[in-house]
Structure formats: C-alpha cells, structure tokens
Image (spheres, rainbow, N blue to C red):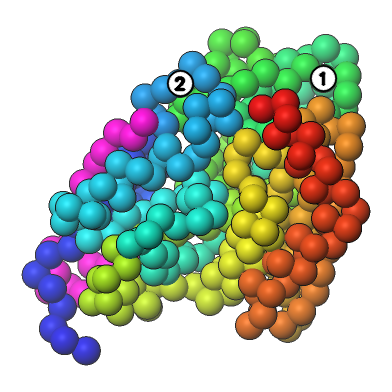
Amino acid sequence: MSASPKKLVIASRESALAMWQARHIQARLQALYPETEVEILGMTTTGDQILDSPLARIGGKGLFVKELEQALADGRADLAVHSMKDVPMNMPEGFALAATGEREDPRDAFVSVRYERLEDLPEGSVVGTSSLRRQSQLQARFPHLKIESLRGNLQTRLRKLDDGQYAAIILAAAGLKRLGLEERITQLIPPDQSIPAVGQGALGIEIRADRDDVRALLQPINHAETEACVLAERAMSRALAGSCTVPLGAFARMRGNQLHVVGFVASVDGSEMVRDEVNGPPEYAETLGKALAKKLVEQGADRILAALEQHA
C-alpha cells in the first residue's frame, strides 16, 4: 500500500451524537495511521434545520446526508460518517459506502420519567417518536396510546420528555449508549416486539466512488458481520422502495453460521401488518434481503405500500 496521506478530513453533522461517531472513526484512523492528521468538518444539514415537521413530510432521512455529500464532491472532505439508518437505500451516482462500523445495540429504547414499561402506560398516554416504523408497531400492540411527532437531537428530545410534553418517548438505544446516557433507558424493547430500522446502531462511512485510495485506508475499520447484516436489511428495504415515509423495518443477526433476517411492512396505524423471516449464509446477504421482500409482497406488502402512497 502507498504511504499514508498527510491529512484526512471527515465530514459530520454537528449534533452531539454525530460528532461522537465522527470522533470514534477519527480515533480509529489515527491509531491505524499515526502519520496522518485526521480532521473533522462539522456541518449543519437541512434535516437539522427543519425541526417543526415530521421527516416523512419534508423529504426523508436523505436530508441528513446531502450537505455532507456536497463536501465530498467538492473535495472539502475525504469521507463522511453517518448513522446507517440515515443513509438512503439508493446511493446517489458518484458516491459509495466504503465501510460499515461495528454495530452498537440495535434495539429501540423506551424512555419515561413516570412509567417503567410500555405496558404500564395508561389509555391516552402521549408517546413521542419521529419514526413511522415505531409508530405502526406501537399502535398495533397498544392501540390505546396517542403517538405524537418528536423531532430534534437527542438532548432536545429528552428535554421535551422531562418538561412533561410526553408520557414516554422511544429512541434508538445505540445513541443513548454512545453518549453515555444509558441510565435514561427505562426499558429495552426486544427486536421481535419492535423490529429496528434498517441499519440501526451501525455506522456507515461514505466516500466519493472514485476515491479508491480512501476506500483502501478504510478496510481495517469495516466490520464484516455488521456489513452482512446491513446489506441484507438494506436489500429488503430497497426492494420494497423503503424510506422513512414507509413504516417498515428489518433486522439481521448471525445465528450460528447463518444470517437470520426478519422484516415487516405496516400501515401507519398498525391495523395492517405483514412480517416474515429468512435464513441463509451471510455471503448471500443481499439475496436474502430480496427474498424476504418477495415473501412480504406475497403476503400483501405491495397492497399496503400502494395504499400508503395514495394517502401521502
């Protein structure tokens, strides 16, 4: 391999969690390449600026990556670090995912000041979440709860809960753990009760597709098991045209030497839901994801998705 570059620049959103993720990758790269100066370019994205509308209404999670991709395109940054669940299923032309970081806890977390479990919430309790995926699964299990949109960074969401605007909120456990806020988790929701978002808990590193030099430098950071899991999840979502405007989730994990993938598609109110699972060798991760999508379509996923599109 050629000599390490003098400098690498990481593009990142400026939220506390995004900066934690960028610093984590920065530390990994500095340990691997001590001769290289690794800098972070903090940026505010459109998704960070528009906080008064649900993501599904303003254009989806891609709003968190566009400005970072612009920095890659014009050479201000060499790589961008994302939460994998924020990365659109179809990468724009000229960009590529070069590495997948090891997954943190993929589960959803129930966070409340007054109640210990989801099951304890009284009828009419207001639960905050920014995710149609969480909303549909919550409403299917607890139709008596009231779900309201919750936007903002992690600290903002916790403050809204503490101010009494919600009886409880649902967040990704990974973010709370990474920021040292694990004590705020009241209950971890098992994946079979709340199937996580595609890529939840994993870090994705994006580069310009023509930067083979950066791709080679990132290979030691790539976590093969997490990569296989995320490939399967994203393949399922892509086959179903998934985005955050669609209530769907997928979760893959290794069981022995087999990759086990479970997924679902639902109506927003949870009244209609199809779910299924597949198993197979991890080297066929994308094929497994597509096979799972096909099984869901056979159960009526396409009908649910068509109805959602009509009401969009």
- Secondary structure at numbered mark 1: loop
Query: From the image, which quarter does the C terminus lie in?
Result: top right
- Viewer-nearest residue: 13 or 106: 13
Identify which residue is drawn at 22% across, 49% down: 71
Nearest to the eye among marks 2 and 1: give it: 2
Q: Nearer the viewer, residue 163 or 214?
A: 214
Counting labels gives 2
Q: Position of residue 160 (x, y in %)?
A: 55, 16
Kind of residue at disc 2: Leu
Which image quarter: residue 103?
Answer: bottom right
Q: Secondary structure at mark 2?
A: loop
Q: Please tell me whether residue 103 belongs to the stretch shown in magenta.
A: no
Q: Position of residue 242 (x, y in %)?
A: 64, 48
Q: Which residue is mark 1?
A: 145
Q: Which residue is located at x 73 percent, y 21 percent?
A: 147
The crowd level at tag 1 (other Cα within 10 Å; few <14, some 14-19, many 20+) is: some
The residue under the point 82% across, 48% down is 301
Question: Badges 2 and 1: C-beta atoms under 8 Å apart?
Answer: no
Query: Is residue 257 positioned above or below 36 on the image?
Result: below
Residue at which label 2 appears: 51
Q: Which residues are magenta?
A: 28-46
Real-space CA distance between mark 2 and mark 1, rounded to the nearest whole angstrom: 23 Å
Image x and y of residue 210, in percent? 27, 71
* Type of the residue with mark 1: Leu
Asked whether residue 44 is drawn in magenta, I would say: yes
**Is 196 displayed left or right of 41 in the figure?**
right
Label 2 vs 1, first from the N-terminus: 2
